[in-house]
Image (cartoon, rainbow, N blue to C red):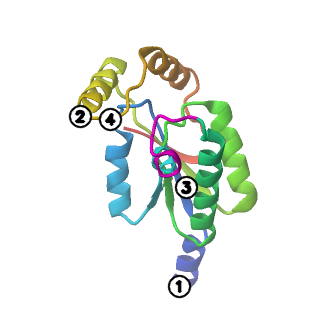
Amino acid sequence: MWNQLKKVAQSSPELVMMVGIPGSGKSTYVQQLKEKGYEVINPDAIRFELTGDMADQSQNKRVWDLTYERLVKLLKSGRNAVLDATNVNLSNRRKFMNAVKEEVPNVVFKAIVVNVDKEEAIRRVQKRVSEGGLDIPSDVMDRMYNNMQLNPPTEEEGFETIEII
């Protein structure tokens, strides 16, 4: 009986979607999940892989196609995965989740919302810029922050659990 339960649990891979604005601490938290065995897919890393520049948006469709392909491959193999991206746009989250669900019907979606004061996130981004990291214009930060506040993840979207940190 225990082995049977274990197999059922293993047959439902998890996709954790990080939700938060740049500088909120998503990638820092993702390291904890990585240590627990989750595979991490980060569109910025794929963007860098394709273009050599994380800020280059010219290959955005290809970046997200590869993100999707890699996540689906992991989930189909039964492994748990993390999507380390902002995921603040409700429409984009829904489209992505629906597409994944078609390929991996037994996937369990979890959201981890990294809620941080916008000014603190801006300070963190500025610190990263001073260390050679990617700059995010303040109007983009404002838009993303407002979008996240207006459209936080919900169970109605298909998330089994939503954790706010």
Question: What is the CA distance from the residue labelled 4 to the residue labelled 3?
Answer: 27 Å
Q: Please say if 38 is above or below 77.
A: above
CB contact under 8 Å: marks 4 and 1: no
Within-10-Å neighbours for mark 1: few <14, some 14–19, many 20+: few
Identify residue for label 4.
133
Identify residue for label 1.
3
Q: Please say if 85 is above or below 129.
A: below
Residue type at tag 3: Leu
Task: Check residue 131 in the rendering and tell me which mark sits there, or answer none.
Answer: 2
Q: Find numbered disc 4 in the image and state the secondary structure of the residue it sits on.
A: loop
Question: What is the CA distance from the residue labelled 3 to the residue labelled 2?
Answer: 31 Å
Q: Earlier in the sequence, mark 1 or mark 2?
A: 1
Identify residue for label 3.
15
Q: Earlier in the sequence, mark 4 or mark 1?
A: 1
Where residue 160 sits in the image (x, y, percent)?
58, 49
CB contact under 8 Å: marks 2 and 4: yes
Q: Earlier in the sequence, mark 4 or mark 3?
A: 3
